[in-house]
């Protein structure tokens, strides 16, 4: 995904998805980074740090975890959790992007955490679908098979 190729309609759709996800999770901040580590869009109160640097680290962390998972025979990472002293960051890799959800103090626990993961996976599918929609001339978009694979993963996790 090339950030420069996102048109206005796609940007609005992404901001709506992130805003809804932020409200559903009572998260402080939700943002989307492309696979190269560039910020795409965000919702909520951003961290005090440089968002470009955060997006780069999020993308590289997701890529490293996914590669490690593949080397261990797991087939790639689908969910990463980073707990700090004050914040919790959940990373949800998608095809060519990473969705990050930042919480103040703590992430959902127990049954609510399972529900939260399903809502987050659904948001990853929705984001992928936005990029699968027709893009400006010459701009890359996700193949329908990638979106179908995400939907199949989501359906399997709900079963």
Image (cartoon, grey):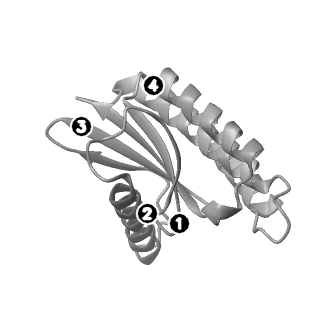
Q: Are marks 2 and 1 in contact (CB under 8 Å)?
A: yes
Distance Cα–Cα, label 2 vs label 1: 6 Å
Q: Residue at image x 48%, y 28%?
A: 22
Q: Are marks 4 and 1 in contact (CB under 8 Å)?
A: no
Residue at mark 3: 87
Residue 61 numbered mark, or none: none
Q: Position of residue 103 (x, y in %)?
A: 32, 32
**Does residue 17 sit above or below 60 in this rendering?**
above
59 or 94: nearer the viewer? 59
Distance Cα–Cα, label 4 vs label 1: 24 Å
Confirm whether residue 4 shows in the render.
Answer: yes
Residue at mark 2: 59
Tell me: 155 left or right of 102.
Answer: right
Residue 35 numbered mark, or none: 1
User: Which circle's residue, 2 or 4, is located before the other in the chain?
Assistant: 4
Label 2: how many Cα within 10 Å (few below 14, some 14–19, many 20+): many
Residue at mark 4: 25
Count the marks: 4
Q: Residue at image x 50%, y 69%?
A: 36
Tell me: 122 left or right of 146.
Answer: left
Kindly state the secondary structure of the residue where label 2 is placed: helix
């Amino acid at each position: 995904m090339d950030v420069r190729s996102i048109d206005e309609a796609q940007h609005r759709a992404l901001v709506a998805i992130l805003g809804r996800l932020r409200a559903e999770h009572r998260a402080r901040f939700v943002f989307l980074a492309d696979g190269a580590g560039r910020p795409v869009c965000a919702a909520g109160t951003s961290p005090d740090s440089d968002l470009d640097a955060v997006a780069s680290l999020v993308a590289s962390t997701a890529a490293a975890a996914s590669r490690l998972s593949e080397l261990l025979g797991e087939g790639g990472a689908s969910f990463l959790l980073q707990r700090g002293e004050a914040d919790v960051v959940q990373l949800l890799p998608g095809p060519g992007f990473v969705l990050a959800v930042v919480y103040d103090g703590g992430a959902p626990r127990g049954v609510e955490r399972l529900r939260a993961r399903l809502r987050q996976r659904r948001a990853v599918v929705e984001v992928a679908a936005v990029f699968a929609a027709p893009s400006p001339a010459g701009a890359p978009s996700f193949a329908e098979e990638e979106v179908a694979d995400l939907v199949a993963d989501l359906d399997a996790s709900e079963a």
